[in-house]
Amino acid sequence: MPNKTFFWFFLPTGLAMILFIGLPIISTGIQSFYAQHDQVVKEVKKCDPFGCTVSIVVDQEKTSKIREEKPLGKFNGFGTYVDRNHLAIEEIGKFWNETNSFGEFVDQVTNLPFYKALIFTLTYCLFVTPNVLLLGFIIALSLNAVTRRIRGPLIFGTILPMIVTPLVGSLVLFWMIDAEGIIGANLQMLMDDPYLSLKSSKTLTWITIIIYGIWHHSPFAFVVFYAALQTVPQEPVEAAIIDGASRWQRVRHIVLPHIYPVVTFVALISLMDNFRVFEPIIGFSAEGSAQSLSWLIYDNLVNEEVILFGSAAATSMMTIVGIAILLAPVLIRTWKEFRTAR
Amino acid sequence: MEYGLDKRSNALKIFNTTFIIVWLLVACFPFIWTFWGSFKVRADFFSRADWWYAITAFNTLIETGGKFTTDAYSQAWTEGEFWKASRNTVIVTFFVVTISLFLGTLGAYALSRSTRNYAFWILIAALIFRAMPHITLVSGYLFPFFQLQIWGILPTTIVVLVAINQPFTLWLLYSFFKTVPKELDESALIDGCSYFQAFRHIIMPVMWPGVITAGLFSLMLAYNDFTVTALLLNQENHTMVPKIQSYLGTNQHEGNLMWAVSAVVSATAPLFMLVMFFQRQVISGLTAGAVKG
């Protein structure tokens, strides 16, 4: 296709992506270097029969004027990146000097908002992604062994958790797990602890969200693996059976190598999706004990008094860096393949 | 897969059946339970005393005189203004699907027929864009949208969702157009058609299977979106998913939690029906590009 024709065909979609994905990333980058204005204060002298007092109050007029003039805020450079709510360089240095043991130091650092969220996000990715691959693969294998006639409805049932939006999915589970719901109430009875609630402990909340993540993402892995299983060639499988290979050996040495490229694809997609975990935290109302990077950004953007654009943007930029690190191996591999293909 | 040689032991068969039944229960029961509970009053579905009430409908019987009640639905749809939210969802979904398919087919067709290097790089860029968490993009939108005073209205959200949706649509339709033989449109070009005419008369009649799949995914994205709609729309224009969340926030109202339950059922039901009808397309879409490795 000539360049000119390509240009006209691609222009609309290219424009949409540049304007609403490319530019926003740049806009986020710029915003991250600015911080909201401080309030302008003035001294007010107040005199009454007992004497005069000087008090400091916010000068509303001047504050709103300066906000209107420079809506982006004041230039802050990398200030937002290193402040207490983000990388907290200063605080970490202080903790390093003040704490006695390494454990205590780690404890202090992981209590800082950004590191807390980072650790939750990584833990979530680390536990959900492998389990999704495993569960999806097992479901695909077992469904593949079922009579063809009833597979349709079974597949429909299997993919339900995936097609609902995460907020709805997590709410539906939350209502059951909650102390007043069916599972929660039965757990209380089983453990003989009337105050047991999945919300009350941090560990239990994390486990719940991770289980939700596996529940929500496994169907995707299942669908892809299931389709891949249909393409496994029959001859080597039959040859292996004749040679006396056990079922496990067949899966290990014939099926798995065949679908290996698909496994990496699913792992990559589900890693990308898990890294942006956010809605389940709202669905499970777990803000207290589990915060993710995306949730931090959301929290800044729905801040009641003044929207913390700078802070949200700084967290966003660091999230994008995180995504870039996750994607790097794939991109490098594609680049190498592309070069050898030429 | 029926292997002629492959005999399964009974133990394996039993294990397999049990596993599938357990998994289906895990996957589907939450939805069945919520559907069931949405016809009860709050004191039954969220019972402090005994969860069994949700089945026997103890309080529902006392409060409404029947074992099932549709109060939660009627209140959420009228008083809770869920009708407005669902109307907004219909508008947003309709326009997002149409516009993204229009842009996506043109772009993906061009990508699939181009042999240049830049086509490869555009696809890689689309992959990177696909990986961006939506919330990071939203944090980039908010400030300029406030300044331009286009925040809170439906058209802005539609355009944003279309753009966010493009990378995936492009990849999906790209791999679909790759399966359409090049000779088809090349013969038309030789006969003197322009590329656009070839697209209009040769490609359009055969592209519908791919377009339906891509359309389903755009629909699911627009219908299910929370991040963009919650932050870019004002209260008045909220679509269904942020509306559900707003019912949760106002818990002091006795009825509101049940509003959320009935709203969840109302929002989920059409989606399930759709997937039931188009199951084949959804599955082929999820595996497009994956199976070829």
Image: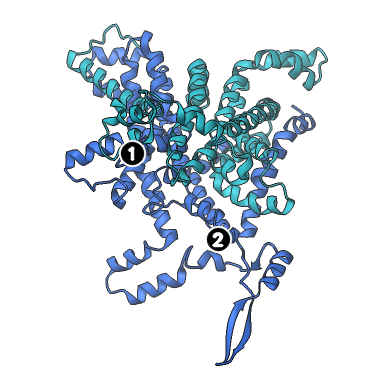
Horizontal and vertical percent for residue B246? Answer: 51, 43
Q: In the rendered image of this protein, does residue B198 appear above or below residue B167?
A: above
Residue B172 placement, left or right of A258 = right
Tell me if residue A95 can be seen. yes
Residue B106 placement, left or right of B164 = right
Q: Please report, as a chain letter, where disc 2 is located.
A: A
Which chain wears blue? A
Give the quadrant of residue B67.
top left
Q: In the rendered image of this protein, does residue A18 appear above or below residue A313?
A: above
**In-front residue for pair A61/A26:** A61
Secondary structure beneath dot 1 equals helix
Q: In the rendered image of this protein, does residue A41 appear above or below residue B146?
A: below
Residue B234 placement, left or right of A100 = right
The label number, if any, that marks residue A211 in the structure image: 1
Tell me if residue B284 can be seen. no
Q: Residues within 10 Å of mark 1 (few under 14, many from 20)?
A: some
Are tags 2 and 1 found on a single chain? yes
**In-front residue for pair A318/A61:** A61
Secondary structure beneath dot 2 equals helix
The label number, if any, that marks residue A311 in the structure image: 2
Residue most extreme to the top: B4
Q: Amino acid at mark 1?
A: Ile
Which chain wears cyan? B
- Report the residue at 58% width, 87% height from top: A54
In the picture, the quarter occupied by the C terminus of chain A is top right
